[in-house]
Image (cartoon, rainbow, N blue to C red):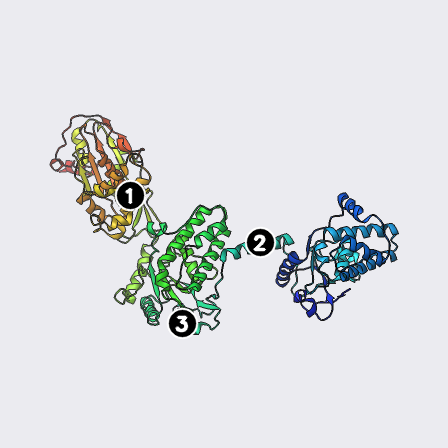
């Protein structure tokens, strides 16, 4: 038999028998946990699973079938002698060697003898013996054949052990097994069986605490299985890994210029940084500092990619270039999509990219494992961008080169943030610049290093050339700060302060139209600003009939609405369906797969609004998209009306476009007055124009003395407020409003008194 000894370290369990200090084995019980113990259990479980026995809970007692088979082979004889036991083992477990039989027989005899000395009867000894023999055959047959060999077999027992279980495991330990017992409930139950700790030793180490909630051999096994799956996903691992930010000083613009050679000298790592600067340390010098940094990186021969504002979305061709399928399992998704990462010029770099991609996908899957389609879409975006920027960042790459990716403006969405995380795992310095503190980058990552400054500066483009940036004087920046104080949440507004707006149609009485008509928008009810968007209250009404039947006053009421910013229509229809429209032939190019192709429109040589302010162009195209998405016009999405909508919106009258160009969302808005005195039907094109003008913030009023259906015939829902003001009139001739005098205001009582006195 082998001797029980105390370990010097946990690693002693994994030393071969011939390299142990003596012919010794170890039997330990573990009643507490630490990270070191957790790592040991994980390793010990793996060895016991492969070459030993893992017992999760009690060893089941021999059942009737077990006992019947034992009786058939061995009979029910029993003698209290080592020779009898050894002879029985030769018949019951014939694969054991003579040495193994002798060792086990001796250990069983010693165990039974100790029971006899405590007063156990012959029958009790026999029952224990038969139980031992059945357990050896059904539970431990695989390890009794390894006893005495150089690789010491392992037993891992989980839970509170019973008396007979302890006796048998002690027998096997004495015969040449290492044993570890995991006791999550502490040592009390065990000490009742072995008060002197003669059979095993209690493990005591620094830093031990309670086992984590839910800890078990099953949890260890599941973790190992997960690790095996993960290892399969990665395939061949790279020889080098990223050391991100551990080496930086915190002065970002200096760190990113740091020579690669002095960042670190461990060839197992590449040294990169992942940083974000919010605001500017000094807005006067900030642009020049960026310019100088860029020049220094270029002069060092490093590759640099600069993106301003947003990372352009993948094109249809880029998306088509990513090979993918329909996935039922996460592992299938990752392994298949990772095949899109190809860099044959440097297999090591391809391994680095593959590992970074798998790392990212595993992290994302942990957040939401229920939606593989969503994860697939994210992965496709990331792979498109990786393939796009790979040649710029890694052409002729070799260790330890580090390229640089600079993003001016910060991440606008989750896909951009994921791409930044991916780049940060590659041999790339990733620098995100957010000088405008009014915008918050959406990226969050525990590895990201941030520098926060108090000064804010509006800067849309990175100064790659010294002609690309302007440096403001102190007075200039002081004025901008004064602007912020004056025009932020004060009710005062700069000219063209806002580039986005939402129109809110007011429900009014007829008499209120005249009152509100020439009023600045900021004074109207429900006007507000939030998150850089103006909510502008507008009038969209139809006036049916003639008040009191009085035509002279009716025409005066129309003339009273003729401001310098009012567009008057008296010819019905204003736009004939057959009227020439140069945009009709291009409309199908501008709307594909249910989406408005804004970039295609803006880049088209016939695009008519390229002369407008950039933010106004974006505003108009956003509202065109909204008009289509909300299907405000009948036939959109059904018979191709959306193409008519696009063509008409892109062909507004020149005078109307000029009104739009100067439209300031916080001041007076442009107007449209449409008078239809006839029975002519208003055209679809007129209806499209009017609905669009309402969306972009025009006040629109229809005067229809006949009360007939007009523009609303082409609307999918009620958009206008209708006012019935009097009796219907027919066959009216629209007079020239220039010839109609406005009514003089009625004299008040003071005027009357003074006139009488004269």
Q: Residues within 10 Å of mark 1 (few under 14, many from 20)?
A: some
Which residue does the image show at 23% across and 41% down from the upper left?
647
| In front: label 2 or label 1 | 2
> Which label belongs to residue 591?
1
Residue 516 visible, this orientation: no
* Mark 3 to mark 2 CA distance (whole Å): 42 Å
Earlier-in-chain disc, 3 versus 1: 3
Horizontal arrangement in the rendering, residue 388 relative to residue 357 (left or right) = left
* Mark 3 to mark 1 CA distance (whole Å): 48 Å
Earlier-in-chain disc, 3 versus 2: 2
Question: Which residue is disc 2 drawn over?
Answer: 225
Residue 346 figure quarter: bottom left
* Relative depth, front residue between 500 and 238: 238
Horizontal arrangement in the rendering, residue 60 relative to residue 382 (left or right) = right
Question: Which residue is disc 3 drawn over?
Answer: 258
Do residues under tags 3 and 1 come within 8 Å of each other at their CB atoms?
A: no
As helix, strand or loop, the secondary structure at mark 2 comes to helix
| In front: label 3 or label 1 | 1
């Amino acid at each position: 038999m082998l001797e029980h000894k105390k370990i010097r370290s946990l690693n002693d369990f994994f030393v071969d028998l011939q390299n142990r200090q003596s012919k010794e084995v170890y039997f330990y019980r573990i009643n507490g946990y630490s990270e070191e113990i957790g790592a040991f259990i994980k390793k010990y479980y793996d060895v016991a699973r492969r070459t030993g026995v893992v017992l999760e809970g009690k060893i089941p007692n021999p059942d009737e079938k077990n006992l019947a088979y034992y009786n058939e082979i061995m009979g029910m004889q029993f003698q209290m002698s080592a020779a009898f036991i050894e002879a029985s083992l030769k018949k019951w477990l014939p694969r054991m060697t003579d040495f193994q039989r002798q060792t086990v027989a001796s250990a069983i005899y010693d165990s039974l003898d100790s029971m006899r000395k405590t007063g156990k009867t012959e029958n009790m000894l026999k029952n224990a013996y038969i139980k031992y023999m059945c357990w050896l055959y059904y539970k431990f047959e695989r390890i009794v054949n390894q006893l005495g060999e150089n690789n010491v077999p392992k037993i891992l027992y989980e839970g509170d052990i019973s008396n007979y279980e302890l006796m048998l495991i002690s027998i096997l330990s004495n015969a040449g097994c290492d044993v570890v017992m995991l006791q999550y409930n502490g040592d009390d139950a065990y000490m009742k069986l072995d008060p002197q700790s003669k059979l095993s030793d209690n493990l005591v180490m620094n830093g031990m605490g309670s086992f984590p909630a839910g800890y078990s051999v099953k949890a260890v096994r599941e973790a190992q299985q997960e690790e095996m799956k993960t290892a399969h996903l990665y395939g061949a691992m790279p020889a080098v890994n990223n050391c991100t930010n551990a080496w930086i000083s915190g002065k970002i613009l200096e760190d990113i210029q740091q020579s690669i050679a002095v960042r670190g000298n461990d060839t197992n790592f590449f040294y990169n940084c992942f940083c974000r600067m919010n605001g500017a340390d000094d807005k006067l010098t900030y642009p020049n500092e960026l310019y100088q940094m860029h020049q220094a990186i270029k002069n060092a021969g490093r590759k640099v990619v600069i993106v301003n504002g947003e990372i352009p979305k993948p094109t249809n061709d880029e998306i088509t270039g990513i090979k993918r399928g329909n996935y039922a399992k996460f592992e299938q998704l990752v392994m298949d999509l990772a095949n899109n990462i190809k860099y044959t010029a440097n297999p090591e770099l391809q391994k680095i990219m593959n590992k970074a991609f798998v790392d990212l996908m595993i992290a994302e899957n942990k957040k939401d494992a229920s939606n593989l389609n969503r994860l697939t879409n994210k992965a496709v975006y990331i792979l498109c961008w990786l393939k796009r920027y790979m040649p710029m960042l890694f052409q002729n790459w070799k260790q330890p080169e580090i390229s640089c990716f600079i993003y001016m403006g910060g991440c606008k969405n989750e896909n951009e943030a994921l791409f930044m995380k991916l780049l940060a795992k590659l041999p790339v310095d990733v620098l995100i610049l957010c000088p405008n503190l009014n915008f918050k980058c959406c990226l969050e990552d525990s590895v990201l290093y941030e520098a926060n400054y108090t000064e804010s500066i509006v800067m849309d483009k990175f100064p790659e050339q010294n002609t690309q940036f302007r440096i403001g004087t102190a007075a200039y920046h002081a004025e901008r700060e004064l602007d912020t104080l004056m025009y932020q949440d004060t009710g005062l507004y700069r000219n063209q302060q806002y580039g986005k707006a939402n129109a809110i149609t007011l429900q009014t009485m007829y008499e209120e139209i005249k009152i509100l008509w020439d009023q600045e928008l900021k004074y109207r009810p429900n006007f507000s600003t939030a998150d850089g968007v103006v909510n502008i209250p507008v009038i969209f009404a139809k006036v049916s009939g003639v008040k009191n039947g009085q035509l002279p006053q009716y025409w005066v009421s129309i003339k009273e609405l003729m401001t310098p910013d009012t567009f008057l229509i008296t010819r019905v229809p204003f736009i004939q369906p057959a009227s020439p429209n140069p945009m009709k032939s291009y409309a199908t190019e501008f709307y594909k797969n249910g989406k408005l192709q804004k970039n295609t429109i803006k880049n088209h040589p016939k695009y008519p609004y390229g002369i407008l302010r950039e933010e106004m162009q974006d505003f108009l195209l956003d509202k065109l998209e909204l008009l289509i998405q909300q299907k405000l016009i009948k036939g959109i999405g059904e018979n191709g009306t959306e193409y008519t909508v696009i063509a008409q919106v892109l062909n507004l009258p020149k005078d109307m476009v000029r009104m739009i160009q100067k439209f300031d969302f916080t001041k007076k808005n442009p107007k449209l007055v449409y008078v239809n005195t006839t029975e002519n039907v208003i055209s679809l094109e007129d209806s499209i124009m009017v609905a669009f003008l309402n969306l972009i913030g025009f006040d629109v009023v229809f005067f229809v003395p006949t009360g007939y259906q007009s523009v609303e015939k082409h609307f999918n829902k009620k958009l206008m407020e209708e006012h019935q003001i009097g009796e219907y009139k027919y066959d009216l001739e629209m007079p020239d409003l220039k010839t109609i005098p406005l009514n003089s205001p009625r004299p008040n009582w003071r005027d009357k008194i003074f006139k009488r006195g004269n």
